Image: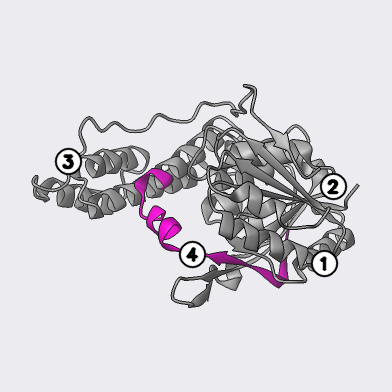
Amino acid sequence: MAKVSVIIPTYNRSNLVREAVQSVLRQSFADFEVLVVDDGSTDDTRSIIECILDNRIRYFYKDNGGQSSARNFGLAKATGEYIAYLDEDDLWPVDYLKIMIEHLNTHQEYGAAYTRVIEQFPDGRKEEMSSPERYKSGWITKYSFDLGPCLMPSATCFRKSVWKDFFWDEAIRRCPDYDVFLRISTRAQFLFVPDTYVIKRWYSENLSSVKDPVGMIDKAHTLERFYFHLGGNKYVMRKAANRKISRAYRKAGKISLAMGDRHSAMSLFKKASSYYPLDTRLYFDFLKALLKSKKGKIVMNWLMPKPLPPYITVTQKPRKMSDSLD
């Protein structure tokens, strides 16, 4: 049994996932297993992984169900005392696991440890994703809801016990990370580890998705469900929750307006004002959308995406799966 189970979900990004796996194999901490969960890829992902000759790698293929589905699948197969997720477009420096596991071993009161994120852009430029003052240790639920430290699955190591009877919500396709970190922060303390980092690689595909308003609407829905259905009201005051949810809808509206989608923007600004009508910026936003030329982009039959169900969705249907490197 390995000390750490590294779960790498992937879909049609064979070159990226190969580099991610290699960054794990180069770790100075060697007591791990790598679970590559192929979420229905149609490229050469399988052959790429099979060409990496290391008996610590386990490759699984399953029908496409989304990143959360792949992570849940890997979690069910994991045998390690610790769980570490690594997205296919992220990389670990050589001492990442060594440093993170040492800190968790030393600080038994913490259920998870997280570290800094360095963004790497297509032009080679690198930037730290968050300023140092945003990183906190301890019970971080309220802080995560209000402001949020820079938490990413690839930059976090967990004790497996934290995941007992706990899953990724497969109903959330755009921003499942925020939902998981909010929920898991109510059952475990988080330790910030400044001594290492994770590299987040940006490229044309994932940069363009940042401009998509649907991801921000998903975030608003995540906040709504956490606060009104999953006990978030025990950690966050109602006024603060209203402001946060309103800001998420406003940001989605601004993205829609910038894309020329006038109708969607007006609907989102209206939703934002229903949570925090005292935000005068919303009325200027709404007026700007109202005055925007009707010759702009038209989205036929646009409807506000439905809220998340108040429960956590985990797909139970049978999945096509093979374990070729076990």
Q: Residues within 10 Å of mark 1 (few under 14, many from 20)?
A: some
Q: Is mark 3 on a helix, strand or loop?
A: loop
Q: Is residue 9 visible?
A: no
Residue at the far top: name it.
317
The one nearer the camera, 17 or 124, is: 17
What stretch of residues is rendered in magenta?
191-215
Q: Gap in Å between the C-alphas at discs 3 and 1?
A: 52 Å
Residue type, mark 4 in image: Trp
Which comes sooner in the sequence, label 1 or label 4?
A: 1
- Circle on res. 98: 1
Task: State the residue position of label 2.
Answer: 80
Q: Residues within 10 Å of mark 4 (few under 14, many from 20)?
A: some
Task: State the residue position of label 4.
Answer: 202
Q: Is mark 2 on a helix, strand or loop?
A: loop
Which comes sooner in the sequence, label 2 or label 3?
A: 2
- Circle on res. 31: none
Q: How crowded is mark 2: few (under 14 residues within 10 Å), some or many (20 or more)?
A: some
Residue type, mark 3 in image: Ile
The residue under the point 62% across, 28% down is 314
Q: In this view, does 170 lie above or below 152?
A: above
Position of 303 compared to 178: left or right? left
The one nearer the camera, 155 or 234, is: 155
- Circle on res. 298: 3
Please check the rendered image and state whether residue 60 is part of the magenta-colored stretch, yes or no.
no
